[in-house]
Image (cartoon, rainbow, N blue to C red):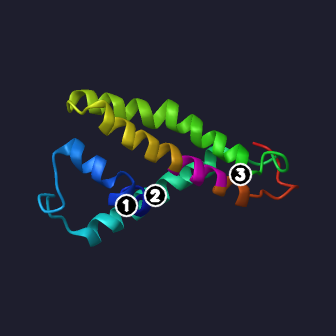
């Protein structure tokens, strides 16, 4: 998702502008390390979403992309956005910077929640907790 979203022709240039960076002035990092850590963090996030979008005894109408996408929206506005805004205020980030990241996480969490919930099916005979 980030590969597309933060591409120069989508929001990458706007994101770099909010930080005062150009392609040449961006700090150098070990991209292999960054991508491995991102993969691990994404796995943890997907496990949290899996636990919270559905559960035993909810088979049927709740196993849908729409239901999971709703959870993604809720997670964005009640968890991700407040955390980003609080950090952004203390880091003196501008509105455009925050909006770019909040929109990214809205799209990402909607897609993650929707996909995970659509593919998540508990056995019908499993007792509810």
Report the quarter where the C terminus lies.
top right
Q: Nearer the viewer, mark 1 or mark 3?
A: 3
Q: Residue furthest front?
A: 9
In space, the residues marked 2 and 3 are separated at their CA atoms by 19 Å
Whether residue 54 is visible here, answered yes or no, is no
Q: Residue furthest bottom?
A: 32
Residue drawn where x is 44% and y is 37% of the image: 80
**Residue 114 placement (x, y as % from top left):** 65, 51
Q: Residue furthest right?
A: 125
In space, the residues marked 2 and 1 are separated at their CA atoms by 6 Å
In space, the residues marked 1 and 3 are separated at their CA atoms by 24 Å
- Disc 1 secondary structure class: helix
Depicted 33 relative to depicted 113: above or below: below
Label 2, residues with CA under 10 Å away: few <14, some 14-19, many ≥20:
few
Q: Is residue 117 left or right of residue 94?
A: right
Is residue 36 found inside the magenta-colored segment of the image?
no
Q: Please name the residue that numbered disc 2 is placed on.
A: 42
Q: Nearer the viewer, mark 2 or mark 3?
A: 3
Q: Along the polypeptide, which appears first: circle 2 or circle 3?
A: 2
| Magenta span dominant secondary structure | helix
Between 9 and 105, the residue placed more toward the observer is 9
Residue drawn where x is 34% and y is 62% of the image: 37
Residue drawn where x is 62% and y is 48% of the image: 51
Q: Are marks 2 and 1 in contact (CB under 8 Å)?
A: yes
**Residue 39 placement (x, y as % from top left):** 41, 64
Q: Is residue 115 left or right of residue 41?
A: right
Q: Which residues are magenta?
A: 108-114
Give the image quarter of residue 118.
bottom right
Q: Along the polypeptide, which appears first: circle 1 or circle 3?
A: 1
Q: Which mark is residue 38?
A: 1
Q: Please name the residue that numbered disc 3 is placed on.
A: 65
Q: Which mark is residue 6?
A: none
């Amino acid at each position: 998702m980030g590969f597309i979203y933060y591409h120069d022709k989508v929001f990458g240039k706007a994101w770099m502008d909010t930080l005062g960076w150009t392609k040449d002035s961006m700090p150098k990092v070990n991209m292999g390390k960054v991508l491995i850590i991102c993969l691990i963090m994404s796995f943890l996030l997907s496990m949290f979403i899996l636990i919270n979008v559905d559960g035993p005894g909810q088979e049927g109408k709740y196993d849908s992309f729409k239901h999971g996408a709703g959870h993604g929206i809720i997670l964005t506005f009640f968890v991700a956005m407040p955390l980003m805004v609080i950090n952004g205020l203390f880091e003196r980030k501008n509105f455009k910077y925050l909006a770019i990241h909040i929109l990214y996480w809205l799209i990402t969490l909607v897609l993650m929640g929707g996909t995970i919930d659509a593919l998540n099916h508990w056995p019908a005979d499993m007792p509810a907790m």
